[in-house]
Image (cartoon, helix red, strand yellow):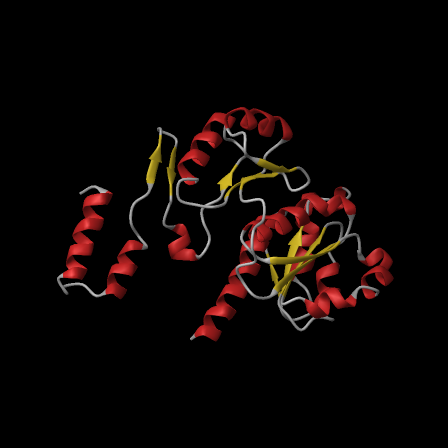
Amino acid sequence: MTQPQAIKTLLESVAAGETSPAVALDKLKHFPFESVSNFAKVDHHRTLRTGFPEVIWGLGKTPDQIAQIMAAMRQRNSVVMATRIDPDVFAQLQVTVPDIHYYPTARICAIAPETIPSNFPGTIGIICAGTSDLWVAEEAAVTAQLCGFQVQRLWDVGVAGLHRLLSHQQVIAEANVLIVVAGMEGALPSVVAGLADSPVIAVPTSIGYGASFGGLAPLLTMLNSCAPGVGVVNIDNGFGAAILAGQILRTAQKLLRE
């Protein structure tokens, strides 16, 4: 049975009283995907299931593949996003997708309205230890903003100069969820968690000298944090941290509605 036929059958079942709207909604959450040529299957129902649309992972895909996937996704989404896009790939994408926008520090490109409204209450505070970690922090910030969340940035406040962080404690106090990005030894999330009354998502980066082992040292530091309330995502995963922070705020909103 094709997807349109299956939807028609399901709607007829609801109209006849054989299926409840709640059961129908649950079934719609798991309806099929759309094939794009022979290399991709776009999951159009991911927003319905998880609250966030599918996002294109750019590494390993050709500009033509990314452009074709975007063309399929933009038919049903107001925002279409691709991560880990290098400048030369973006330049090629612009030829076929002229309205695409590029965030160079975050290495994200997106088809999106000029102004994206904040669809959710609350603020995601994003704190970055050093300037070299900025690309990971900006990946988190841009992802959160494109998903409709309010973001407060605080950059270059690592523990080597702790007074820089302590002079901006209002960012910590005002945030409902905090994302803390750090490389080297990765101590910053523990410090922030000792000051914060909100969840802290720690993001280790691959920035550091040889003994940081490409981010393994800060990852282990964050996993062994003595401060409670710290969750850790994978090395350089600013995107994953933003989605986790968004899910926390969405869940809080859902609980308030219920």
| Depth order, front residue of 183/8 | 8
Measured as percent of width and height from the top left, residue 248 is found at: 53, 64
Can you see residue 196? yes
Q: Residue 166: image x %, image y %?
A: 82, 66
For the point 29% across and 49% down, the residue is 31
Q: In this view, does 42 lie to the left or right of 185?
A: left
- In percent of the image, x 72 and y 64: which residue is there? 190
Q: Whole-percent x and y of residue 152?
A: 69, 58
Instruction: Give the total number of marks visible in the rendering.
Output: 0
- Check the image and name the residue furthest to the front: 114
- Please tell me which residue is depicted at 27% across the width and 65% down the height of the picture: 22
Q: Please say whether residue 226 is visible from this viewpoint.
A: no
Foreground of the two, 152 or 208 = 152
Q: Is residue 45 left or right of residue 191?
A: left
Measuring from the top left, give residue 198's x and y in whole percent.
64, 70
Q: In this view, does 27 lie to the left or right of 168?
A: left
